[in-house]
Each structure stands twice: as C-alpha cells, then as structure tokens.
Image (spheres, helix red, strand yellow):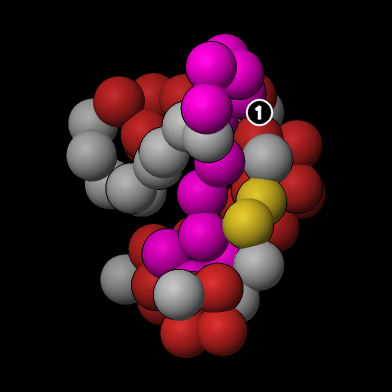
C-alpha cells in the first residue's frame, strides 16, 4: 500500500506541503477532504502523501 500511496505523513509534514496551519489541516481531515488514519493506540493522525497531493490538485 505504501508504494501506491507514497509515504505516510504526520500533520506537520502535511501542513508543510499544504502551506496551512495545524487547525486548518484538522478541519480538512474532519470534513473528509483528506482521508486520515491512526496506527495502533497512538493518538497521532497520519495521511498518505498521495491523498494530500490529490487534494492539492483538486
């Protein structure tokens, strides 16, 4: 899966790509505009690089 979707990004790397704030990033995730996931019991939210790029191209 990682090969098809690129790398996993945390909020900070995704915000750098999008040039946006942390709160705006979380608003995009909560609105379903960028799919996100959690790994294990960690509270961190991850997104796929391809999904961020797809949103940027939209």
The magenta stretch is 40-51
Q: Residue at x 40, y 41 (%)?
A: 36
Q: Residues within 10 Å of mark 1 (few under 14, many from 20)?
A: some
Image position of 14 with respect to 6: above or below:
above
Image position of 25 with respect to 55: above or below:
above
Q: Of helix, strand and loop, which one carries label 1?
A: loop
In the image, taking residue 37 as reference, residue 20 lies left or right, namely: right
Whether residue 6 appears in magenta in the rendering, the answer is no
Foreground residue among 41 and 25: 41
Image position of 33 with respect to 53: above or below:
above
Question: Measured from the top left, where is residue 47 in percent x and y?
Answer: 51, 49
User: What is the total number of numbered labels drawn onto the structure image?
Assistant: 1
Foreground residue among 47 and 16: 47
| Residue lying at the far bottom of the rendered structure | 4
| Res 31 → quadrant | top left
Question: Measured from the top left, where is residue 10 in percent x and y?
Answer: 68, 40
Image position of 51 with respect to 28: above or below:
below
What residue is disc 1 on? 21
Q: Residue at x 53, y 17 (%)?
A: 41
Image quadrant in which the C terminus is located: bottom left
Residue 36 appears in the figure:
yes
Whether residue 41 appears in magenta in the rendering, the answer is yes
Q: Residue at x 60, y 18 (%)?
A: 42
Residue 15 appears in the figure:
no
Question: Measured from the top left, where is residue 27 in percent x and y?
Answer: 39, 25
Q: Residue at x 41, y 38 (%)?
A: 37
| Residue lying at the far left of the rendered structure | 32
Question: Measured from the top left, where is residue 19 in percent x and y?
Answer: 69, 48
In the image, taking residue 31 as reference, residue 12 lies left or right, namely: right
In the image, taking residue 21 as reference, residue 39 lies left or right, namely: left
């Amino acid at each position: 899966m990682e090969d098809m979707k690129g790398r996993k990004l945390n909020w900070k790397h995704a915000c750098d790509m999008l040039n946006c704030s942390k709160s705006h990033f979380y608003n995009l995730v909560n609105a379903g505009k960028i799919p996100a996931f959690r790994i294990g019991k960690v509270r961190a939210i991850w997104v796929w690089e391809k999904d961020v790029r797809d949103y940027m191209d939209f």
